[in-house]
Image: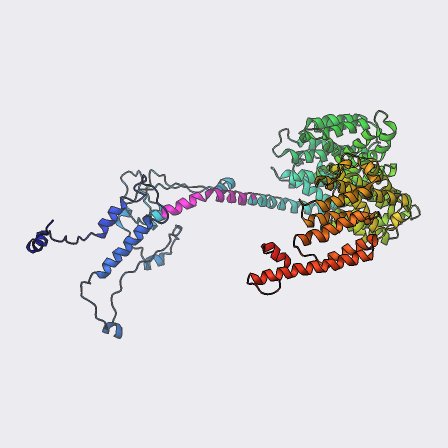
């Protein structure tokens, strides 16, 4: 195609349209246009990633563009001169208005001003729109908020203001003047004040709880304040009563208590304070109880903390009194009547007070009569009424049975134990029922329970009786730790252990329960058997009692320092040795319990701790008998090392070996135990050799199906055959074959079995010939071990010849590795194993 002439090409640019002019777009127009596409106005738009600027970034950039545009616009008065005389000579210029943000403050009511101040400083005129009434208003009154804080932006919507009363004000009964209704007063607030009010409203739940807590504290403080004044008046009248004669003192105190007692819910708490004040005087208990049983004296609810404290005070006063308090049963009856039928608090807290009151009524009835004498009808009715108010109705049934018999027989204990050891442990009633019984009756029953169980009960065997004992001890433990409400520091479990030790029941009979206790409880329980041991018959009883008391006190320090159970037992044996008390019988108890329920590992750990402390046993005969009895079942049972039982037996043998190493004098005088232990250990090692050879497929066919007892008779020949087969096996490395052969050598040496030429040839082939043939380095230490085996069997000359051939062979291998290294361009020493690993030789 021909090109157009030059004239046509010059005329083409003249025909083109003119360049478009620049268009100036206002920033306000641009911002309004962009606002239409913000997420706030267009919720249907999808959300971009974090790399795309959002509306806040667009708004910030718009502000920067606006400031840039204003900076490029020339000022109206022209460009300011670079030098200003006004600034030099300090001419005052009109400052530009500056704006500063101030956060809104909480509105406060205006303080009344004095007339002189109002005359000197009249109130400035208010904006006219704050004085104009709303057409919808029915009154012309204005709120203080309208007068103090005028509207900031009339364009915003109207907000209704409602008066809010806090929960603390409602609790305390505080009322505030009601604000005008929303229909009569309508104001418009700024968005800042609206947001602040919203944040305050969001915090209201937390503030409500805090205010309620402060209100409860103020109410409780108010109770104390309400009781202080009548208590002071009562103290003054008690001092006055001390000066009156005995004939007028009771009437005066009765009138004083009734006149000072407050009216309302504080009356029961005031009665407790009255009892505490009267106990500090020299008045007799009968006089104090007579004053408190007056008709107009209010008593607290026994299920409340104040009621519990009142029951404790009355029970303590009755115990310290040498005479019987006559009207105490009347007071207890009034307290039972105070117990509500429908509990308002938790069942556990309620039952604690009921159990304590039940026991106090029972103990008070026992003080006025003997144990075999029947209760009065009023006392029995009071106990029956109180029993109906327990949360668990089964407690009332068991208590009725005990009340009619008033002896804790084996049948009743059996029922209680069955109720506490069934599937439904939430309905356990055994320990709570025992908590309702007076401690004097319960202690007497604990002392006679073992004799009654093993002598008078004929329909149960010993295993059932021991199982019943363990459940009985568990129930007493629950009573001591969780349920007991007795103020006395009486541990019923300790009394039960003492009764078992006194009757002659060994701790191994209840070892399952003892091993489940905490370390402190276990050691404390074992101490109850110390005075009844035969080894301490020659020790004065006073010395044993002092030792038990002092050691229990030192146990508390061990509990605080978190000492382990084995360490506590080791310290007990060490302390007995320091106090010159025989400790071998206590060690026998510990070993039997641990070996029966925890295994030989615990026994070994205790003995090791004794050795580290440098503590010895006063006798080791029990340890010899224990080892002999424990090794007999292992010797008689079939040996299967692949089973779990075989592994346990192997560990047991190892533990017994460790015990023999710790106490060498244990087995020196008993050759029978030593022979049993040696034979069992040899049997275990040989069984391991047979299993390893069977897995490596080197066991001869003739011996594969033979039992272990028959193989033990020809074990020397069999070991030689296995070693020879290891030397011929090329499916395993030389190191694996050498480790297996070395184990065979140790077995022959330890059991003092002869080593024949077949074994030495196998060792020679595996330790020297095979590795050197595979071009691997063999150390001179390995050669020395081989020569020491060969010399006694084949002679010294053979050993020397092997040594000579070895050094020549190994020297040639080293020279070959060095030549190969230099031929490959390397320098330095040539390591045979490294060259073999790199594949160079």
Is residue 7 found inside the magenta-colored segment of the image? no
Residue 79 in percent (x, y) is at 20, 67
The residue under the point 76% across, 40% down is 690
Can residue 112 be seen?
Answer: yes
Is residue 200 found inside the magenta-colored segment of the image? yes
Can residue 286 be seen?
Answer: no
Vertical relation: 566 (above or below) 818: above
Residue 101 in percent (x, y) is at 34, 56
The residue under the point 62% across, 46% down is 229
Vertical relation: 495 (above or below) 375: below
Closest to the observer, 560 or 139? 560
Q: Is residue 143 left or right of residue 219?
A: left
Q: Quadrant of residue 223?
A: top right
Q: Is residue 833 left or right of residue 541?
A: left
Q: Is residue 655 left or right of residue 622?
A: left
Magenta part mainly helix, strand or loop? helix
**Color scheme of the displayed model:** rainbow
Closest to the observer, 516 or 471? 516
Outermost residue to the bottom? 89
Q: Is residue 776 left or right of residue 650?
A: left
The residue under the point 72% across, 58% down is 806
Outermost residue to the left? 7
Residue 268 in percent (x, y) is at 65, 38
Closest to the observer, 817 or 368? 817
Total marks drawn?
0
The image quadrant where one finds the C terminus is bottom right
Q: Quadrant of residue 411?
A: top right
Vertical relation: 555 (above or below) 490: below
Residue 63 in percent (x, y) is at 28, 54
Q: Which residues are magenta?
A: 193-216
Closest to the observer, 30 or 328? 30
């Amino acid at each position: 195609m021909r090109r157009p002439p030059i004239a046509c090409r010059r005329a083409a640019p003249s025909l083109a349209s003119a360049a478009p002019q620049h268009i100036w777009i206002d920033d306000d127009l641009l911002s309004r246009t962009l606002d239409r596409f913000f997420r706030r106005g267009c919720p249907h738009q999808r959300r971009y990633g974090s790399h795309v600027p959002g509306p806040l970034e667009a708004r910030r950039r718009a502000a920067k563009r606006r400031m840039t545009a204003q900076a490029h616009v020339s000022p109206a008065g022209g460009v300011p001169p670079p030098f200003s005389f006004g600034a030099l000579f300090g001419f005052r210029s009109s400052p530009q208005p500056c704006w500063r943000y101030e956060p809104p403050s909480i509105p406060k009511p205006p303080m009344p001003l004095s007339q002189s101040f109002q005359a000197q400083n009249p109130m400035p005129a208010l904006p006219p729109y704050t004085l104009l009434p709303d057409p919808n208003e029915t009154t012309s009154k204005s709120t203080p908020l309208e007068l103090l804080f005028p509207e900031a932006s009339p364009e915003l919507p109207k907000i209704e203001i409602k008066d809010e009363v806090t929960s603390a004000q409602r609790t305390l009964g505080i009322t505030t003047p009601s604000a005008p209704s929303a229909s009569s007063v309508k104001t418009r607030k700024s968005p800042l004040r609206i947001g602040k009010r919203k944040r305050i409203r969001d915090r209201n739940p937390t503030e409500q709880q805090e205010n309620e807590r402060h209100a409860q504290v103020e109410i409780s403080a108010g109770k104390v304040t309400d009781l202080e004044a009548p208590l002071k008046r009562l103290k003054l009248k008690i001092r006055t009563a001390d000066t009156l004669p005995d004939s007028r003192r009771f009437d005066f105190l009765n009138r004083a208590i009734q006149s000072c007692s407050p009216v309302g819910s504080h009356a029961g708490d005031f009665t407790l304070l009255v009892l505490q004040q009267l106990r500090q005087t020299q008045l007799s208990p009968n006089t104090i109880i007579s004053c408190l049983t007056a008709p107009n004296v209010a008593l607290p609810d026994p299920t409340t903390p104040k009621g519990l404290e009142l029951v404790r005070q009355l029970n303590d006063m009755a115990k310290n009194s040498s005479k019987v308090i006559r009207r105490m049963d009347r007071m207890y009856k009034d307290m039972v009547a105070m117990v509500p039928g429908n509990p308002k608090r938790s069942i556990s807290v309620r039952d604690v007070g009921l159990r304590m009151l039940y026991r106090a009524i029972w103990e008070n009835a026992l003080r006025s009569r003997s144990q075999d004498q029947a209760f009065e009808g009023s006392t029995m009715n009071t106990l029956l009424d109180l029993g109906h108010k327990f949360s668990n109705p089964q407690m009332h049934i068991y208590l009725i049975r005990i009340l009619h018999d008033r002896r804790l027989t084996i049948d009743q204990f059996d029922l209680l134990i069955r109720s506490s050891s069934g599937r439904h442990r939430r309905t356990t009633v055994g320990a709570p029922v025992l908590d309702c019984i007076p401690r004097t009756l319960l202690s007497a029953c604990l002392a006679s329970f073992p004799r009654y169980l093993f002598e008078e009960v004929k329909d149960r065997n010993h295993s059932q009786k021991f199982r019943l004992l363990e459940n009985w001890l568990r129930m007493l433990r629950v009573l001591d730790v969780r349920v007991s409400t007795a103020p006395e520091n009486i541990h019923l479990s300790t009394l039960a252990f003492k009764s078992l030790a006194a009757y002659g029941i060994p701790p191994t009979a209840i070892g399952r329960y003892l091993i489940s206790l905490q370390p402190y409880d276990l050691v404390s329980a074992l101490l109850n058997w110390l005075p009844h041991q035969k080894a301490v018959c020659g020790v004065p009883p006073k010395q044993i009692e002092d030792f038990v008391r002092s050691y229990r006190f030192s146990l508390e320090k061990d509990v605080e320092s978190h000492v382990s159970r084995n360490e506590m037992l080791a310290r007990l044996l060490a302390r007995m040795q320091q106090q010159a008390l025989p400790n071998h019988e206590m060690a026998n108890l510990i070993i039997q319990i641990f070996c029966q329920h925890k295994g030989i590992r615990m026994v070994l750990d205790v003995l090791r701790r004794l050795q580290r402390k440098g503590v010895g046993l006063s006798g080791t005969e029990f340890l010899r008998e224990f080892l002999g009895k424990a090794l007999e079942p292992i010797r008689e049972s079939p040996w299967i090392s692949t089973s779990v039982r075989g592994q346990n037996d192997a560990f047991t043998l190892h533990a017994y070996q460790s015990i023999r190493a710790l106490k060498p004098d244990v087995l020196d005088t008993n050759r029978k135990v030593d022979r049993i232990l040696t034979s069992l250990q040899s049997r275990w090692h040989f069984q391991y050799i047979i299993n390893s050879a069977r897995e490596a497929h080197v066991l001869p066919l003739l011996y594969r199906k033979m039992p272990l007892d028959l193989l033990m008779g020809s074990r020397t020949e069999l070991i030689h055959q296995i070693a020879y087969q290891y030397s011929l096996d090329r499916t395993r490395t030389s190191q694996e074959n050498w480790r297996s052969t070395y184990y065979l050598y140790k077995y022959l040496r330890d059991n003092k079995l002869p080593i024949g030429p077949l074994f030495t040839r196998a060792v020679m082939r595996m330790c020297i010939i095979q590795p050197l043939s595979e071009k691997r380095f063999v150390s001179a230490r390995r050669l020395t071990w081989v020569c020491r085996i060969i010399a006694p069997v084949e002679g010294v000359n053979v050993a020397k010849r092997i040594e000579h051939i070895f050094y020549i062979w190994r020297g040639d291998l080293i020279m070959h590795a060095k030549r190969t290294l230099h031929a490959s361009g390397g320098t330095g020493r040539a390591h045979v194993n490294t060259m073999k690993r790199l594949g160079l030789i």
